[in-house]
Structures are given as structure tokens and as C-alpha cells.
Image (cartoon, rainbow, N blue to C red):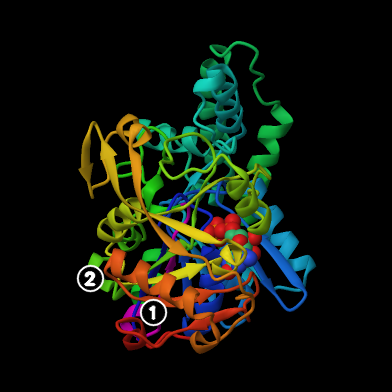
Amino acid sequence: MTNVVVVGGQWGDEGKGKVVDLLCPAFAEVVRFNGGNNAGHTVKFADRHFALHLIPSGILQPGCRCLIGPGVVIDPVALLEEIRMLEDQAVSVRPRLLVSPRAHIVLPGHRALDVARETASGAAKLGTTGRGIGPAYEGRARRTGVRLGLARNPRRLREAVAAASAELEQAIARCPGAVAPSADEIERTVEAAAAIAPMLGDVSRALADSDAAGRPILFEGAQGTLLDVDHGTYPFVTSSGCLAGYAAPACGLPARVIGGVLGVFKAYTTRVGSGPFPTELFDGTGEQLRRRGNEFGTTTGRPRRTGWFDAVAARAAVRWSGIDAVALTKLDVLDELAEIRVATSYQVGGQTTPEFPDDAEEVGAASPVYETLPGWQADSSAVTTAEKLPDVARRYVERLEELLGVPVAVISTGPRREETIVRRVQPFAGWNVAP
Ligand code: GDP
């Protein structure tokens, strides 16, 4: 068995939750390695529906242990709410969840600062989720953050939270109209952190022992490769590393433990928040994708921007994350279209290029060069074998494989766990992880 990283290959919301949920039965451990509760995964099976933000989707598989690594920033109130939501639905969480004491706490002041800055930026805002994730990572880099491990020592936790909150209050005061959090709100965070303390433990040690014992690990990425803080469309990016290569070191493991990378891509593209999006559609087709694909954020409910599949951006993501195989989701959303376009290169400053520019303004100014493929105008929803897909839909998938240079191993034809085609292609079949 191979340790596998699942990452988004686009700007997030690719359907990673469903793909991770599908693969989980083959893994003993599922670990989140980046981001915070700005991520949102939706998992549906039978008549059940779960929206997860911090806890890995593996929690829905009774045999899996779930871990939250040191590189994740945790809002203790949100984590506790998520634990309770799952427990209310008879999912056992506390005995199966291990949280790194090195993970940083998202304080109410981080949230207030996030919202205040976005409001003050007006049209120039980044489009963050307002959950305080960026300011929490900033605090980590400034070395003024509070780590969850302090929850094991209530006195030290209170002191650290008070010091960090006082510093944040000064920053909030500089934003016109912003309101600093109340003492009660800060106290709720301290109490929630204390409630999480029994779940704290050494994530690196636990995973290293599992790896040595041959218990396979699934690393669950949040956001998407194009939102990576270094490689994405900076500054319209998230504040953590999203590339698959970060997964192991972020959890205190050597990079060599990773055996394979599965990249999740939608059959088209979406983006939430601001930032360049060359293949964005502003017409009825864009609206059709939004409606059929139910493209509204899990975390914020915001309508997502929609557009054609961008093979230029996707090829960059394949290289940056070392994607070995693709899980292609939401193929069914394209069912009604008469024709489908795919960007194969960009026109930038009068030049045609197959490369994704490093500068966000340049990406924004790029005109996609499209290849137009026929639509299948037939029902692919809920199809579970490749043979039953309309021929034209299969050809679309094959064309994406050619453009990306990697095989499509999983095709998702509906939101439910059951609505999936698994293709035994290499190297995916060799990982021996298929459900
Ligand atoms: P994630 O953050 O990458 O896990 O993505 P989200 O869960 O936010 O968004 C994916 C959405 O698409 C969820 O509402 C899923 O239930 C839904 N979804 C996933 N795969 C498919 C699919 O193949 N077809 C359709 N129609 N919906 C899907």
C-alpha cells in the first residue's frame, strides 16, 4: 500500500471531500496538512450530507483515524462545533481524532482583523472567507501566534491568548469601523481550546509509527494548487502551502513517505473570491454551470465564478504538485452543453505561450486559446462504468488526459459516493488504494 496525497488541482472546491471519502476505506490514517476552517468539504452518501471544515473527511469511515497536522490553523470554537455536529449524527470523533499541539489557534482577533481589512479594501479585497486564517498565519510568521499545545496548561494558554489579543486589538484599532472581539468571545475560544486538549498528541510520531507498521496514510489537502501562497496567483492566494510536496514535511515526516499524488480537478473551472481567471464565463453558459454544478461555497454560500477547463493552469498544477493521476469531478455538469471549450495555451502580450505566468496581472490579461470539443448532450449522471459513458464524454476525458499528460483514474458523475467511475489505470492501480 502507498501513502497518497489528495490535492485540488485548481482554485479549490474541486470535490476533494467526495474523493477523499471514497478512498478512505483503503487507509488507516487520514491527515489534514494545511489551511483552516476556510476550507469546506461536502460529503454525501445514502441520504446523509456532511459539511466538514477542519476534520478530515475520513471521520465518516469508522475504521479511519483522523489527524490534524501542525501546519493547520485551528479555530477551537469551530472545531468543537464540528465535533458536536458529527456526534449529533452518531459519528464517533473524540477517540479517533488526534490534533497536533503545534497547530496554531485562530483567535477572535484574527477573525475581526480579517473582516476589517477586507471591508476597508473595498473593491480591492482578496475575497477571503473572513475566518481569520490569513491573520493567524501572519501571527505564526511574526512569532506572536498561540499554539494549541498551550491548552494543556490553562495558565499559560490564558496569558498567551491575552498577549496575542492585545496585540491584535492594536491592529484592529487601525482599521476604521472595525470592532475588537469582546472578552466573552475570547474566553469562549480559551474554553474550547481546553475542551480539545484531550485530543492533542504527536502527529509526526503517530504517522511515522503507522508508516513503519505499513498502515497507509492519506494526506488530505485543502484549497487548491493554484491558491498556493508561493506558486498560485499571488496575492490572490491562500496563506498556506497547497502543493502536494508540503504534505509530509508539514506533518513532520520526510518527503519520501509519499508514494503517489492524486489531483482532483473539476471537468470545468471555478474560483471563489477575487483574482485572475482567464477562462471565466460571464454569459448564460457560466450561469448554467453555476446552477447545474450548484456552485455556491460550502463555507460562505458565495456564488462561485465559473468557466471552461484551463489546461494551461492545470498543467502547471500537475507539475508543481507532481500529480500522478487525476480524479475528474462533475463531468455530469457538462451534460447539456452543445459544445465544450478547453484552454490549451494563452496569448500574453501578443505571444502564444503554453506556460502559466508567474504574475497575477499577466494571468488576468491573458487571452485563452481555446480548443472546441463537441458536447455529448446525453445523461452521464450517476454512470458508474467508463463503458456506459456517452462516447463523446469519454473522448473529452481522453483529451484532458492528453493535455495534462497524466491519466484520469477517477471520474465523478454525481455528488454521491456511489456516483463514481474508478479506472484501474497506472500508477493509480499500483497504489492499491481503489475502493
Ligand atoms: P472540496 O472543497 O474540494 O471538497 O469541494 P466542495 O465539497 O466544496 O464542492 C464540491 C461540491 O460538488 C459538493 O457540493 C459536492 O457534493 C459536489 N460534487 C462533487 N462531485 C460531484 C460530481 O461529480 N457531480 C456533481 N453534480 N456534484 C459533485
Residue 214 within the magenta-colored segment of the rendering:
yes
SS class, disc 2:
helix
In the image: residue 265, left or right of residue 159: left
On the image, numbered disc 2 is attached to which residue? 256
Give percent across and percent down for residue 75.
59, 45
On the image, numbered disc 1 is attached to which residue? 210
Give percent across and percent down for residue 38.
56, 46
Q: Which of the 4 image quadrants contains residue 377?
A: bottom right
Give percent across and percent down for residue 358.
26, 38
Q: Is residue 191 above or below residue 51?
A: above
Q: Which residues are magenta?
A: 210-223
| Kind of residue indicated by mark 1 | Ser
Residue 93 within the magenta-colored segment of the rendering:
no
| Kind of residue indicated by mark 2 | Arg
Asked whether residue 218 appears in the rendered view, the answer is no
Asked whether residue 193 appears in the rendered view, the answer is yes
- Which residue is depicted at the point 35% across and 32% down? 365
| Disc 1 to disc 2, C-alpha distance | 15 Å
